[in-house]
Amino acid sequence: MRVIVDFDLCESNALCMANAPEVFEVRDDDFLYVLQEEPPDSLRPKVEAAARACPKAAITIVD
């Protein structure tokens, strides 16, 4: 699984971080960082929840 974020759409509202803090982080500079571009399959449910929570649909999961 690979996580792709469209940073042109991303608003850094941290909803993804709330669902998968192991993968996403919004730092003090108010930018989103992907901590694991290829997270283990054990995190798939959290990453899928993060993608669904994104109001701008900026997160894509590629197998």
Image: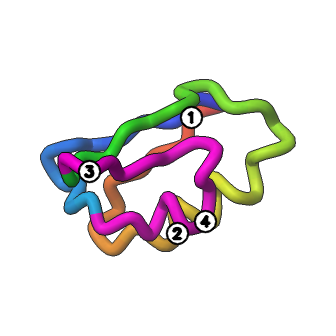
The alpha-carbon separation of the residues under discs 3 and 1 comes to 28 Å
Tell which residue pokes out farthest to the top in this image. 38
Q: Nearer the viewer, mark 2 or mark 3?
A: 3
Relative to residue 52, is residue 30 drawn left or right? Answer: left
Callout 3 crowding tier (Cα within 10 Å): few <14, some 14–19, many ≥20: few
Q: Earlier along the polypeptide chain: callout 3 or callout 1?
A: 3
Relative to residue 3, is residue 8 drawn left or right? Answer: left
- Pointer 1 residue: 62
Kindly identify the residue that appears in the image at 32 percent across and 54 percent down: 58
Q: Which residues are magenta?
A: 13-29
- Pointer 3 residue: 28
- Pointer 2 residue: 52
- Pointer 4 residue: 19
Q: Earlier along the polypeptide chain: callout 4 or callout 2?
A: 4
Kindly identify the residue that appears in the image at 48 percent across and 73 percent down: 53
The alpha-carbon separation of the residues under discs 2 and 1 comes to 14 Å
Tag 2, which secondary structure?
helix
Q: Nearer the viewer, mark 4 or mark 2?
A: 4
Q: Earlier along the polypeptide chain: callout 4 or callout 1?
A: 4
Q: Are the two marked residues, 2 and 1, in contact with CB atoms closer than 8 angstroms?
A: no
